[in-house]
Amino acid sequence: MNDEQKKPDPSTLPKKAASQALNFFYGSKQALKNINLPIYDRKVTALIGPSGCGKSTFLRCFNRMHDLYPGTRYEGQIRLYPDDVNLLDKSVDPIEVRMRLSMVFQKPNPFPKSIFENVAYGLRIRGEKRRSVLMDKVEEALKSAALWNEVKDRLDELATTLSGGQQQRLCIARSLASEPELLLFDEPTSALDPIATASIEELIHQLREKITILIVTHNMQQAARVSDFTAYMYLGDLIEFGWTDDVFFRPKEKQTEDYITGRFG
Amino acid sequence: MAVSDSLRATISRAKRNDLIFVALGIAALLFAASTFVALFLDMVGDGLSRLNPSFFTEFASRRAERAGILAAWVGTFAVMLVTALVAVPIGVASGIYLEEYAPKNKLTALIEININNLAGVPSIVYGLLALGLFVHTFGLGASVQTAGLTLALLILPVVIVATREAIRAVPGSIREAAYALGATRWQMVSDHVLPYSLPGILTGVIIGLSRAIGETAPIVTIGAVTFIAFLPPSPVTSSPPFLSFDWLASPFTAMPIQIFNWTSRPEEAFQANASAAALVLVVMTLLMNAIAIWLRYRLRRNLNW
């Protein structure tokens, strides 16, 4: 992304979040091993690696999705800045965490309700009842998700009548409506055709001006296209992290190079 | 390489078995369907002549040609109302709890197995339970409320199982979408799972009720009256508070009991009455099932995941 610019030393950049000595267990099986990863403010960080490497598991630690399933256990910390709180701390309510961080899933999962109600839902559960405020925020979110022009005349229609790509942009709008501090994408284009994928990637590009993004992708080209930073994971370990073009063109680790060049994975 | 003759013979043998099964399947289906059609036509033949407006507005009588099913259909309607009002909230709440809240442990598994077993308990057993519990212990009498509660118990497993299946059909991705936005479990259930599984739940409730409507054994056991010449008191009164629940404690009769009573009479004319009443009951059941199918179709149009 930043080929032409001079890249500053990452450690001078402001951080939005950081995982510190993060271990994660499904029952007795350890899925993440001592992950230390900074997430820089208003940058796109991509997580890549072969299936089963733990990249989605890592992403789902951020909004405590694992709390929904029995037998899961976190160790270590994920700190969210600027208030420097540990999201994984037992005293932190996972609902509160999910109110601050939003997630967009692999498969578009709009609610079978109207387009308006989909985007407004996050605001409603935050207690917003004023119709005019909901209307303004829904419009703003749909504009940010580059969907407004396509749906402004049919906000009362069912969200499930939209095309796959539109549904995914609707899910992005739904996530943006409540003004999250960090946006998590879990392979957001894996169920979409190339044209819809391109529009989502374009959208991610625009969003990074305003919001910090962490994206899991199985598609290396996508990571190269949309991200500022890339982390390569393998079997629960973080192998390499750095500026995306460093990771892609000048990998420090042999393993990363093998994966990037397609000799493995 | 050419196909050998022995392989061809094997294929044609396999195809012949295929045909044999199709023939057997059609024969089995025809047997079941034609039995029902024959019974239904026989019932129509015997009973149709008795189906006139006064049949619905007259009480039972010793003279067959003047007897009607007024007390029976009003009683059935009142009992079904109580059954639905008791079984639906309890059944749906149990289904939601088991599916969305209950921890997956041995106790839950035991409860689940028992609910499935309860669906197979003979209905007379529910009648005996109700006689002991509702009639004698609680002193509720051989009344509309006792019958309603008994039949509610009877269909509770059906409602619970239908609720759970409907809830399970809501994809996990929808649940995660709601949670990821910060919803609590109850917000997720009440805003999403429940509305989306409503068609399935309603279908289960109606199928449960259409089973209850034809039940005879349990309400005979609790002591429903077989000959009755009055209606339960009206639930709406002319003086404040304009609502009365006296009908709950009223003695009653119901369609299956009326039919049973008439079939046990020696006179030929009462057999025609029984057929006519049975025809009404079957049409009621078929109508309820039709409503269930229509509701499912109407409400599911929006849900395509």
Image (spheres, coloured by chain):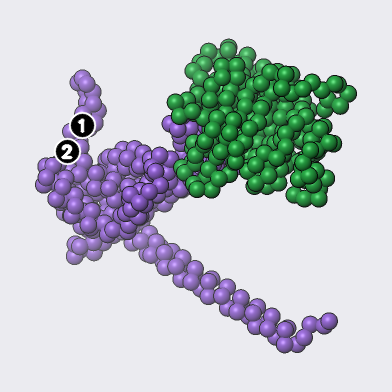
Quarter of the image with the C terminus of chain B is top right
Please state if A97 lies on the left or on the right of A228 as rendered. Answer: left
Judging depth in this view, the residue of B252 and A234 nearest the camera is A234
Colour chain A is painted in: green
Judging depth in this view, the residue of B210 and B6 nearest the camera is B6
Residue A96: image location, x then y, percent: 50, 24
Colour chain B is painted in: purple
Please state if B58 lies on the left or on the right of B172 as rendered. Answer: left
Q: Which mark is residue B245?
A: 1
Residue B208 visible to an observer of this rendering: no
Residue found at the far right of this picture: A4
Q: Residue B270 carries which label?
A: none
Image position of B28 with respect to B75: above or below: below
Q: Are marks 2 and 1 in contact (CB under 8 Å)?
A: yes
- Residue type, numbered disc 2: Ala
Q: Which chain carries label 2?
A: B
Question: Secondary structure beneath disc 2?
Answer: helix
Image position of B263 with respect to A20: above or below: below
Callout 2 and callout 1 share a chain: yes
Give the crowd class for mark 1: few <14, some 14-19, many >=20 residues within 10 Å.
Answer: few
- The residue under label 2 is B249
Residue B284: image location, x then y, percent: 37, 49
Tag count: 2
